Each structure stands twice: as C-alpha cells, then as structure tokens.
Amino acid sequence: MQLFVSQLLNGIGSGVVYGSIALALVLIFRVTGILNFAQGEMALFSTYVTWKLTEQDIPVAWAIVLSMAVAFVAGAVIERVLIRPVEEARSPLNVVIVTLGLFLAINSLVQLVFGTDPHSMDSPFPTGRFELFSSGGDAIEVQKQTVGLIVVLIAECVLLWLLLQRTRLGLRLRAVASNPDSSRLMGINAGAMLMVGWGLAAAIGAVAGSLVASAPGQAGFDSSLMQGILVYAFAAAALGGFDSLMGAVVGGLVVGVANALTIQYVGALDGIEVLLPLGLILAVLLVRPNGLFGRTTVERV
Amino acid sequence: MADPTVPGTEPETVPGTDPDHLLEPPRPDVEVSEGVEAAAQAEDTSVHGVPEVPPMPRPVFIARVVIGAALAFAALYAPYYFQEDMNKVLAQALYLAVAAMGLNLLTGFNGQVSIGHGAFFGVGAFTTAILMVDHGWMFEPTILVSALLTGLFGLLVGFPALRVRGLYLALVTLGLAVAFPAVAKRFVHGSGGVALVRPPRSEFGSLIDGVDDDQWKYAVCLVAVVLLFWAARNLVQSRTGRAMVAVRDQEIAATTVGVNLAATKVWTFGLSAAYAGVAGSLSVMVEGFADATNPIIYFQRSIEFLVAMTIGGAATILGPLVGALLVVLLRRNTSDLIEGKEVLSPALFGAALIAIVYVLPDGVVGGVKRLLARLGRRETSQRAQVGAPNT
C-alpha cells in the first residue's frame, strides 16, 4: 500500500511536468493551429536563462519570473519572424518542418551559448517531505517538491482559464483561434494575438523547464533535458484532446501515473514500460478519436 | 475548384486552415494547375497530384530523353568518379530516398501523416541483420523478407489508423517510433549490447559481385531506388493511385464514387511500411549495423523521412529522391563548415531547412514544376497571339 501510494505520487510528480508542457503545446495549437515540435527546446533555452540568472545571485523564484518574461518575448518574435511567413503559404507540413528546424537550431545554439557541461540549480521549493498519514511503522509521505509542482500547475491552469474566459484579451485570442478572417473584420489584430499565444506558451514552457531542471532528483541538466519529456507531453496532449487545456493536464497526469505504476508492477514489460502509456493512448483514441476532452468535428463536402 | 478553363481567375482555395485538418498534406499540384497555367494546359483534366501524360511536343520529348540519358549515365558513373566516403554518402541518400518515397505514398498521395516510419525502418534493419548475422543468409533474400514483414506490420498499424487521423495519427505513430528501440533492446542481444553488426562483404553472398565494397553499397541502393520509384510511379498513375489521391482530397466524395476507403488506406499503409522496411535493410548494408542503443534514433529517422519528402516535394515522384540528396548533402556539408564549432552544425542544418521551406513552399520539385509551367505559359500565350489574328 505504502509502495503503491509513493509510486502514485512519483507518477503524479512527473505527470505534472508532462501536463505543463502539454499545456503549452495545446495553447499554441488552440490559438494558431500548429503542432510545435520546438516547444521542448524553447523551454530548454528558458531553463538555461533561469540557470544563468541564478548564477548572478538572483533567487530562483525571481529568476523563473524573469525567464518567463524573456521566453514570452522570444516566443512572440519566433512566431512573427519564422512561423508567420511560412504559415501564410497555408501548408501545415511546411510549418512542421520549420518547427523541426527550430528544434535542431535552438538545441545547438543552447550548447554553443551555455556550453555542453551539465549544470544544476536550486529548487524554488523547500526540500523535505510532508507526512500524509502514519500508522505504526508505516508512513505515507509526499515530497514537498511534488506538492509545489502540483500547486504551480493548478495556478497556471486557473490563471490561463481566467485569462481566456474572463478578459477581453482572452476573448480576442479565442476569436482569432476560431476564425481568423472574421475576427480581423471585427477589428482584432489577429497577428498580435498569434504572437501573444506563442509568447504565453513559451512562458509556460519556461516554468516547466526550470522546475524540472531544479528538481532535487535531477542530478544536473544538459541540452537533452526536454527531449524525453516532449514525447510524453505529445502523448498527454493526444490523450486529452488537442484542443482542450483541461485535457492536457489530465492527459499528463494519466501518462505519468501509468508510467510509474508500470515500472513498479508490470514485470513482463521490464525495459519496455513505454509501451503501456502508448497502448493506453491508442486505446483511448480508438474509442474517442479526438481525445478524451476534444471536440468532435463535422466534415462538410 | 474554379473552372480551370477561364484564364485570369484566381480560384479561392484555402486548404487546411481548420485545426482539424492540421498536418493535412500539401497539394502542390493545385497551385500549378490554377487559373492561367491551367488554361495553357487545358487538356490537363486529370486528378490533382497524379502526373498526367499529355501529348508531348517533340522538343520536350527529345529534351526528356537527353536529360534522362545524361542522368542515367551520371548515376552509373558516379561510384567510379567519387571516392569511398562520397559513395557512402550517396548510398545513404539512396536508401533515405526509398523510405521517403514510402512516406510520400502514404502522406503525399494518400493524406495519412506518419511519424512512425522510423519504426518500420528499424524492423527492416533488424530483420536483415538477424537473418544475416544469426542465420548466414545472403543479402538479397533478406530484403524480400523484411519487405513482407514490415508490410504486414504496416497493415496492422493501418487498421487503427482508419479511426485515428490527422494530428492524432501523427502522434500515435510517433509513439511507434519511440517504442521500437525499447522493444529491440529487450529482445535483441547483439555484440556489445543492442547493435547487430553485419558481416564484412566477403563473408556473405550477393547478386551484385565483383565491385569494391563502397561501389557495391551504392549499386545495391541504386537498383532498389530505380525499381521502387518505377513501381511507385506506375502505382500512382493507375486506377489505385487515383483512388489514393481521391481519398486524400475528399474522403466522403471518394466513397460516393465507389472508392473503398478502408481498403485503400490500409493497403497504402502496408505498402508504405514495406518501402521503409526495404530502406532499413539497405541501411544495414550501408552503415554496417542495425542499432537501437539511442532511444530516439528511430524518431529522428522518421523526422528525416518527413523532411526529405517535404523539401523535395510531396506528392511528386522525384521529390523524395531530390529531398533525400539535399538532406544528406546538407548534413554532410554543414558538419564541417565551421572549424572547431561542431555543436553549431545542427543549427546550420535547421536553418537550411527553414530557408528551403521559405523559398520553395512546395518543395524543390514543386518549385521546378511551377517554373516550367510559367515558361510554358509564356510560350503558349505568344503562340496564341500569333495564331489568332482575327477575333
């Protein structure tokens, strides 16, 4: 029981990270209809910015905030300079190629600017554990780190929801997402909204990347930090439905927990644990082809 | 589409802006046959994406024969002209072209996007490696076995792909590419871990004999490319090919004219996977091993196929070959461009990709086609003016 709960909590801990990157992917997808392969590497770059700032004796929490600001600007610039000219040709595969090119370019730029040695930085959360429940010798504990991650993810979701549903900016973002041409006719600066969308996603990625890199279990990070995570984040987004923010978070948690429990309990899949979350996603998509929370679409001929 | 026989109209085609059609493959031929260009080739009434054969003017026919003969000569003479390392690079481009053509049949002509072809490639590579290392087979029969095996595997994947589409299909297949190295690691134990090293050339038989090792690699890949591209060309020009394109462009309309949607999609998936499998077999010959130590290697392969197909020109026959050559040569030339700054080479490669997509949105072959169409239009319009003195 104790083992089960601790594995569950581990799974939630990594699931939260998958969820936040998936959140960024879904945000870009919602606003611009693009699958951004460079999301992980954009987060990687921001993580290095955070690290560089902490080296200047800025507290980690403030470093993350500053790095979010940098990421916001960088994301907006990438959208304007690299993505939009290609997107105007209206060929989605070409946009995919551009994000793949970005993936390679950012990764090697990071290595050039910040070096290839692994780095480490302090976590913004206190170390140690909360004791949830104890009876006799058994105690169920949860790392403060995990709790911190969950709190941050919840805060991100609430803020995003408020932004999208309760502000004029959010209304404009949603209008551009649902119909760019009509929203332009209504006087919305659609280009600016696309830039905001990319900026927001980059900022969310900055938080997720910095938190992963500073986690106590992380022995140090280098330029391959986000690559494994990105695959699981894609899985999470597909599971939840690519147009649902809620779905991204739930998908992330499901993938994280499924992975942790498989590693612990399914001996037959030793070494190939990755098959279980993937099988799960396939099963979900076969029943609901647009993900758990995705909208179904009607095709007109 | 607007009436293609009315010159000067700009038909309003706005494909793929709806998020549900994200990753819908490009339709390069739509642009070419739009408006004025189409008027110049008014006899062009074929389905978009299928290269049609209009009655060919004599000079064009002669030019084609001359260019074709020159290219054939160059392809045959290349292994004797270049050094060993360049021959290996060319062989790499050729097997990459086979895989990219497989993906092109599926994505370019049939509209199903896959980022999982790396897995089929891997299955092909390991099939050939296992048969040769553990069972001492000669090389060529192993290609047939891996084509069959990956084809079957592709059919299996094709069935769930009927239900899941677009972006979701891309991500499910991505899972395939990520899972494959883990599975291979579990079940394959080669020398020094997961990698299976093929025996040296002198220890196994092959139908092509009596040439140096590097020339042999090139020759084997060249034969495969010629056969498989010829087959692909015939396929997409056939009734089946037209059905594939119809399914890509409009599924519901395709079913109403009697195309068997499920069969077309599943068989295309199987065939496409078989192409990737053959490419995997060839890669064992060229690289000398089948490897799964790097957990994302087959994901990277899938991306390579996608890039080669797109920058060469999706839904064209020569596109995958041109794209594969570009990818391999770009990578080779960016890797030692800057002395002492090797970390930058992926950045240059990435920047080159972005630049190509900027300049040639429908790929190299698409761009050339557009250029030729423009030249042809000028000529025909002049001829039309001369030939029509009285209105």
Image (spheres, rainbow, N blue to C red):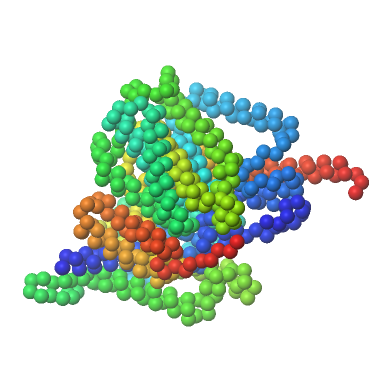
Quick one: B131 or A219, which is closer to the camera?
Answer: B131
Query: Can residue A29 be seen by looking at this rendering?
Result: yes
Residue at image point 32% right, 67% down: A253
Residue at image point 53% right, 41% down: B320
Q: Number of labelled discs?
A: 0
Name the residue furthest right: B390
Residue B160 located left or right of residue A183: left
Query: Can residue B327 be seen by looking at this rendering?
Result: no
Residue at image point 40% right, 43% down: B152
Looking at the rendered image, the quarter that the N terminus of chain B falls into is bottom right
> Where residue B141 sits in the image (x, y, percent)?
39, 29
Name the residue furthest bottom: A166
Residue A168 located left or right of residue B133: right
In this picture, is B279 found above or below A252? above
Quick one: A243 or B45, which is closer to the camera?
Answer: B45
Name the residue furthest left: A136
> Where residue B307 sits in the image (x, y, percent)?
49, 47
Residue at image point 45% right, 25% down: B215
The image quarter containing residue B214 is top left
Residue B230 located left or right of residue A293: right
> Where residue A105 sits in the image (x, y, percent)?
45, 52
> Where residue A27 sits in the image (x, y, percent)?
46, 67
